[in-house]
C-alpha cells in the first residue's frame, strides 16, 4: 500500500516530480558520462603505459636510505656498517617527502641511483608467484654525435633485447627502418624524432647501419661509446611526451655510459699502431721545434687523424658478456589475473623482509607527470560533480518541502487514524527513493546513449593538453559499470539527504491539523 | 465503567503573553453505545473536548480516561496505537486521501501500524475485502468502490469517511461537525446513517456540532459555553440531569 501511495503521489504532483526527476536525471547523466570518459581515459592510459614501457610495477632504489648509509660510512669508516633496516627506519623517521620517482625522472646516472643487490635477489624475486616477467633497465640523458659537429639530444633507455621482447614491449614499436640489435650484440635504435633532429644537424639523413657516438655526462664524468644504428622507430601510442624523445640502447653499453659497470673492468684494447704511437713518442717529438712548425695545415691530415681516432674507439666497446648487475630500475610484469595493488603490497612486504633498500612504484608513478595530469583532470571533474550534487540537493529539498507542505492535512489525517511517525517517514523516503531511482535510471539510459554515440564517433582532443591525456589519438569512451553504480548510489544518497528537512516537517505534523482543516 | 470520562479538565492555551482558558473544569461521562453530542457556540471549547477524547491534545489539568486508561500517562507511540485501535475520525472536510479510490480509502486504516502493533495484520486478504465491502454496502457506495474522491459528491465523500472511520471496528467514532459542508438534506441522510451504524454496531459516536438535526437524534447531549458545561442531559427514555458548573 505504501508503494502504491508513493507512486500515486508522485503522479498526482506530476509537475514537481518532473522538475525534481529531470534535475536528478541530468546530474546522473553528467556524472555517468563524465566518469565513463575518465574511466576509458584511465584504462587506455594504463594499458598504454603498462603495455608499452612501464609494466605493471617498477622497482627502484630507495635513494634516501642508501644516501644515509653512505654518509654514516663516511663519518665512521671503521664503525660497523649500519643495517639497512636501520637506515630505512631513520629515513622513515625523517620528515616525509613525496616520492616523485618515475621512469623518466629521479635517475641521474651514476652508481648512486642503481638498484642495490639486484643480482643476488634475482633468483628469489623471479620465483614470486605474482611475478611473470622482469626487465632490468637503465635510463638517462645523452647526446648522439658524429664527432664533427652534428649532434642531437636523446633520452637513452638501456634494455636487454631478449627481456624487452619477452615482456611484450617490442610489439608496440612501429619500425620505420631496421629493428632492434641482434641478441648478444651492441646497438642503438633511434626514435624517429631524434633521428630527424640528428639528420638535420648533420645535413644528411641518418641511415640504419650508420656509426654514431653516444656521449653521456654525469657525476662520473663523460663517457663516449660508438654504436651502429640498428633501427629507427616510433612508439605506436604516445602516452607521454617523453616517449617521443626516447631511444633504445643495449643494456651493456648503457651501463658503461651511465657508469653502472663498476663491478667489471672494461679495459681499452689498443691497436698495434696506437701502442707504437704511445711508445715511440718522446717529449721532444711532442714539444720540440718551432711553435708553429710541423703544424697540421692540411685538412686531409686532420681527417686521417680523426679517422684513426674513430677506428680506435671501436675497440673500446664493452662486450655484452661483461654486463654488470647494476640497473636503474626493473620493470615488473605481473602474472595474469594478479591484482596490481595487492601485488605491490606483497612485493613491498617481501622487500622489507629481505631488508632491501628498494621501493616499488605502480604505473601511475612510473608515468610521472602525465598520469598526474590525468588524475588532476579527474579531480576537477569530480569537484564539478560535487558542486552539481550540492545544488541539486538544495533544489530537490525545496521542491520536497513544498510537496510536504501541500499534504500536511493528509499527513495529519493519517496520524489521526493511527499512523505512527515511522510510517510517515517510510512514506516520504519511499517517494524520494522511487523518484531518485527512476531519475537515476533515466539518467543512466541517457548517459549510455551519449557514450554509445561518442564511442562510435570518438572524441577528438580539443588542444595539446588533451592530446597528451588522450595519448594523441581519438578517445572512444565506453560505459563504465563503476560509474553507473557510483552515480546511482550518489543520487540515492543526495535524494535522502535532500529529504531530511522535508521529513522533519512531515514528522512534526500533528493530528490536530486534520481536525482544524 | 463509563467509556469516556472527563474529570475536572482544564485546558489553557498561551496566546503571546496571555493565557486563554479553553476549558475550565469540565466533567462528564459517556457510556458505551451513546450517540453523544457536544454542542455550543463557536469558541465554546467543543473542538478542544473532541481533541482530548481523540487523544490529539492533553489537558492542562484534570484527567481524560478512555476505557479506564488515563491518556496523560501514555507516550506518543501508545497514544497513536490507542487511536488506531479504539478511535475512528470523521472530519468536517472529509479528509479522504485523494490518490486512493473509495475501496482503498476505507481499507487504509486496516494497514496502518507496524506488524506487531497492528491487530488487523493477522486478517486475511479475503477477510479485509469482505469487511470493507460490507461497510461500503452499508453506506450505499458498493458500486463506487473504484472511484477516486474527486469523482464523488460531498455526501458521498462523507459516506466514505464514515465507512473508513468504522473499518477498524473502533469503540468510539469522533465526528467534528460532519454535516457543516453538506446541504441539509444530505446532512440529514448522513446523520441518520451514523445513527444506524451506532445502533447496528454498538459504536459510540461523539459529535461536536451546532446542527439541530444532530441534537434531535442524540441520546446524550452536553451543552458547553465559554469552556464550562452548561447542560448535560440524556434524551427520551433516559434520565437526564442538568449540570451547572457554577452550581
Image (tube, rainbow, N blue to C red):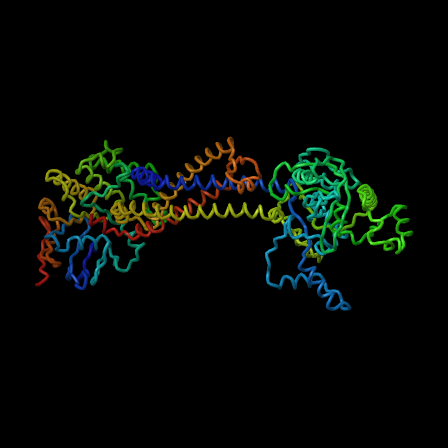
Image quarter of the N terminus of chain A:
top left
Q: Position of residue A375 (x, y in %)?
A: 54, 47
Taking the image as drawn, is residue A456 in sight?
A: yes
Indicate the quadrant where residue A30 lies. top left
User: Which one is nearer the viewer's eye here, B154 or A254?
Assistant: A254
Q: Position of residue A418 (x, y in %)?
A: 29, 49
Residue A340 horizontal side relative to residue B18, left or right? right
Given residues A500 and B36, the one toward you in this image is: A500
Would residue A159 be seen by someone viewing this image from the given angle? no
What residue lies at 14% left-to-right and 61% top-to-bottom? B24
Residue B43, given in percent of the width and then of the height, sits at 13, 54
Q: Quadrant of residue B187?
A: top left
Q: How many marks?
A: 0
Whether residue A90 sits left or right of residue A252 in the image: it is left
Task: Identify the residue at image location x=13%, y=52%.
Answer: B38
Where residue A120 appears, x then y in whole percent? 77, 52
Q: Nearer the viewer, residue A288 or A462?
A: A288
Residue drawn at x 74%, y 68% is A76
Out of A313 and B99, give the one closest to the viewer. Answer: A313
Query: Is residue A235 toward the left or the right of residue B57 in the image?
Result: right
Q: Is residue B26 above or below residue B90?
A: below
Q: Is residue A67 above or below residue A208?
A: below
Amino acid at each position: 500500500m505504501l508503494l502504491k501511495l508513493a507512486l500515486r503521489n508522485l503522479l498526482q504532483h506530476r509537475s514537481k516530480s518532473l522538475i525534481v526527476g529531470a534535475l536528478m536525471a541530468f546530474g546522473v547523466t553528467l556524472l555517468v558520462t563524465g566518469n565513463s570518459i575518465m574511466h576509458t581515459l584511465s584504462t587506455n592510459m594504463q594499458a598504454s603505459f603498462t603495455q608499452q614501457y612501464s609494466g605493471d610495477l617498477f622497482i627502484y632504489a630507495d635513494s634516501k636510505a642508501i644516501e644515509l648509509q653512505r654518509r654514516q660510512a663516511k663519518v665512521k669508516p671503521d664503525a660497523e656498517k649500519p643495517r639497512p633496516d636501520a637506515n630505512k627506519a631513520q629515513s622513515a623517521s625523517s620528515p616525509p617527502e613525496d616520492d616523485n620517482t618515475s621512469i623518466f625522472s629521479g635517475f641521474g646516472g651514476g652508481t648512486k641511483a642503481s638498484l642495490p643487490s639486484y643480482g643476488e635477489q634475482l633468483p628469489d624475486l623471479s620465483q614470486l608467484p605474482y611475478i611473470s616477467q622482469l626487465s632490468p633497465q637503465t635510463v638517462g640523458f645523452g647526446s648522439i654525435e658524429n664527432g664533427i659537429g652534428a649532434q642531437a639530444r636523446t633520452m637513452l633507455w638501456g634494455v636487454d633485447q631478449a627481456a624487452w621482447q619477452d615482456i611484450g614491449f617490442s610489439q608496440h614499436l612501429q619500425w620505420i627502418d631496421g629493428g632492434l640489435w641482434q641478441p648478444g650484440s651492441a646497438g642503438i635504435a633511434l626514435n624517429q624524432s631524434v633521428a630527424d633532429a640528428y639528420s638535420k644537424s648533420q645535413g644528411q639523413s641518418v641511415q640504419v647501419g650508420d656509426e654514431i657516438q653516444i656521449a653521456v655526462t654525469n657525476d662520473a664524468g663523460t663517457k663516449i661509446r660508438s654504436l651502429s644504428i640498428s633501427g629507427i622507430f616510433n612508439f605506436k601510442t604516445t602516452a607521454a611526451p617523453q616517449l617521443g624523445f626516447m631511444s633504445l640502447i643495449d643494456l651493456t653499453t648503457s651501463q658503461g655510459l651511465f657508469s653502472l659497470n663498476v663491478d667489471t673492468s672494461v679495459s681499452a684494447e689498443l691497436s698495434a699502431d696506437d701502442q707504437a704511437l704511445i711508445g715511440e713518442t718522446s717529449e721532444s717529438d711532442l714539444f720540440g721545434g718551432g711553435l708553429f712548425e710541423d703544424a697540421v695545415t692540411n685538412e686531409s691530415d686532420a681527417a686521417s687523424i680523426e679517422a684513426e681516432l674513430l677506428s680506435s674507439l671501436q675497440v673500446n666497446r664493452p662486450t655484452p658478456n661483461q654486463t654488470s648487475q647494476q640497473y636503474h630500475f626493473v620493470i615488473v610484469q605481473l602474472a595474469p589475473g594478479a591484482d596490481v595493488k595487492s601485488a605491490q603490497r606483497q612485493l613491498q612486504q617481501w622487500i622489507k623482509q629481505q631488508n632491501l633498500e628498494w621501493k616499488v612504484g605502480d604505473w601511475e608513478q612510473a608515468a610521472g607527470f602525465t598520469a598526474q595530469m590525468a588524475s588532476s583532470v579527474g579531480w576537477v571533474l569530480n569537484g564539478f560533480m560535487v558542486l552539481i550534487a550540492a545544488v541539486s540537493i538544495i533544489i530537490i529539498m525545496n521542491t520536497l518541502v513544498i510537496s510536504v507542505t501541500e499534504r500536511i492535512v493528509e499527513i495529519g489525517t493519517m496520524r489521526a487514524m493511527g499512523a505512527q511517525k515511522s510510517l510517515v517517514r517510510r512514506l516520504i523516503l519511499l517517494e524520494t527513493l522511487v523518484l531518485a531511482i527512476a531519475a537515476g535510471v533515466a539518467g543512466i539510459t541517457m548517459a549510455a546513449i551519449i557514450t554509445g554515440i561518442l564511442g562510435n564517433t570518438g572524441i577528438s582532443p580539443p588542444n595539446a593538453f588533451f592530446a597528451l591525456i588522450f595519448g594523441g589519438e581519438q578517445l572512444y569512451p565506453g560505459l563504465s559499470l563503476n560509474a553507473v553504480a557510483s552515480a546511482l548510489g550518489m543520487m540515492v544518497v543526495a535524494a535522502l539527504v535532500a529529504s531530511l528537512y522535508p521529513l522533519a516537517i512531515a514528522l512534526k505534523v500533528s493530528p490536530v491539523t486534520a481536525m482544524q482543516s | 465503567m463509563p467509556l469516556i470520562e472527563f474529570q475536572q479538565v482544564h485546558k489553557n492555551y498561551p496566546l503571546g503573553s496571555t493565557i486563554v482558558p479553553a476549558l475550565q473544569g469540565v466533567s462528564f461521562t459517556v457510556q458505551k453505545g451513546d450517540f453523544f453530542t457536544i454542542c455550543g457556540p463557536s469558541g465554546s471549547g467543543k473542538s478542544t473536548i473532541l481533541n482530548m477524547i481523540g487523544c490529539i491534545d492533553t489537558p492542562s489539568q484534570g484527567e481524560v480516561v478512555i476505557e479506564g486508561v488515563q491518556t496523560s500517562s501514555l507516550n506518543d507511540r501508545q497514544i497513536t496505537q490507542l487511536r488506531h485501535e479504539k478511535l475512528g475520525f470523521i472530519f468536517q472536510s472529509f479528509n479522504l486521501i485523494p490518490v486512493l479510490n473509495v475501496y482503498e480509502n476505507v481499507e487504509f486504516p486496516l494497514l496502518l501500524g507496524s506488524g506487531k502493533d497492528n491487530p488487523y495484520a493477522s486478517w486475511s486478504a479475503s477477510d479485509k475485502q469482505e469487511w470493507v465491502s460490507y461497510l461500503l454496502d452499508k453506506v450505499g457506495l458498493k458500486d463506487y468502490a473504484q472511484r477516486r474522491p474527486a469523482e464523488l459528491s460531498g455526501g458521498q465523500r462523507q459516506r466514505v469517511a464514515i465507512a473508513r472511520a468504522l473499518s477498524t471496528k473502533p469503540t468510539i467514532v469522533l465526528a467534528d461537525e460532519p454535516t457543516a459542508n453538506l446541504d441539509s438534506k444530505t446532512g440529514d441522510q448522513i446523520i441518520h446513517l451514523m445513527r444506524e451504524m451506532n445502533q447496528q454496531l454498538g459504536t459510540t459516536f461523539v459529535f461536536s456540532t451546532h446542527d439541530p438535526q444532530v441534537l434531535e437524534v442524540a441520546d446524550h447531549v452536553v451543552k458547553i459555553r465559554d469552556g464550562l458545561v452548561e447542560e448535560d442531559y440524556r434524551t427520551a427514555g433516559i434520565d437526564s440531569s442538568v449540570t451547572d458548573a457554577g452550581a
